[in-house]
Amino acid sequence: LDGQVLCDSTRKAQPGSDRIVVFQNGALFPWYTVLENVTFGPVVQGGMSQKEARDRAREMMSQMGLQDIENNYPSEISSGMRRRVEIARAMMNDPSVLLLDEPFRAMDALTKTVVHQFLLDVYDRSRKTVFFITHDLEEAIFLGTKVYIMTTRPAKIKTILDVDIPRPRDFRVLSSSTYIRLKKECIEAVHEEALKAFAAGEREMA
């Protein structure tokens, strides 16, 4: 592979606190409390003292509805709460870009609706750039400003859809004509690629 990664026109050759990833399978330290997990990054990197980090974390956790679980361990809270804690931990580093790799994939529909609204609220407050990977078309439209649909292998950008749904958003946009139109366009684009992938698989097996 040949190429480079650019962020704000600057070449990035290694990980940095300005680009934080929230992974699909979670990465909280099970031996740390919620508060200790959230304060971990800035303290270890030397960006904040322990007291500064705790004060900042408590303020952020209060905004995110996590103030009552700061002394709990990850195993003692729900999957939805763990996702929220991971996003809070990421935001503690004040990143320029927040990368979310299918963070809600394993959640049931009810929990998803709660964390979707939570993420929208975080975005509305911070206005950080969020790069969100998902196979869920409804999730992509509800959360996104733009939806990039990829082709089958080799993966390239097939379609870019502008999500012209005003913010702030809530569940009521799911029944709007704009949302329904965008969902239809997404389904058509994905279905076309699915047929190509199926045909390619049939040829490989022949």
Image (spheres, rainbow, N blue to C red):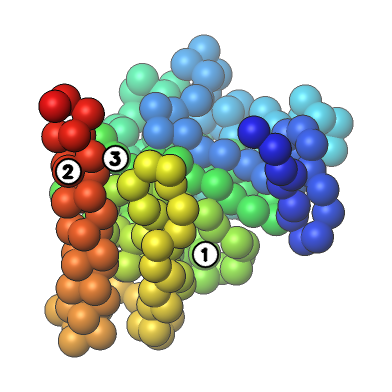
Mark 2 or mark 1, whichever is nearer to me: 2
**Amino acid under disc 2:** Ala
- How far is the residue under mark 2 from the one under mark 1? 40 Å
Tag 1 secondary structure: helix
Q: Which of 193/89 is in front?
A: 193
**Amino acid under disc 3:** Arg
Confirm whether residue 99 shows in the render. yes
Q: Quadrant of residue 40?
A: top right
Residue 49: image location, x then y, percent = 83, 34
Mark 1 or mark 3, whichever is nearer to me: 3
Q: Quadrant of residue 204?
A: top left
Q: Earlier in the sequence, mark 2 or mark 1?
A: 1
Which residue is labeled 2 in the image?
199
- Left or right of 206 on screen, residue 115: right
Q: Residue at x 51, y 70 (%)?
A: 124
Which residue is labeled 1 in the image?
123
Q: Which of 62/165 is in front?
A: 165
Residue 105 marker: 3
Q: Earlier in the sequence, mark 1 or mark 3?
A: 3
Residue 134: image location, x then y, percent = 35, 49
Total marks shown come to: 3
Which quadrant: the C terminus? top left
Q: Residue at x 58, y 28 (%)?
A: 37
Mark 2 or mark 3, whichever is nearer to me: 2
Confirm whether residue 66 shows in the render. no
Residue 97: image location, x then y, percent = 64, 53
Tag 2 secondary structure: helix
Mark 1 closeness class: few <14, some 14–19, many ≥20 residues within 10 Å:
some
Q: Residue at x 44, y 28 (%)?
A: 26
- Answer above or below: position of 71 versus 100: above
**Amino acid under disc 1:** Tyr
- How far is the residue under mark 2 from the one under mark 3? 27 Å
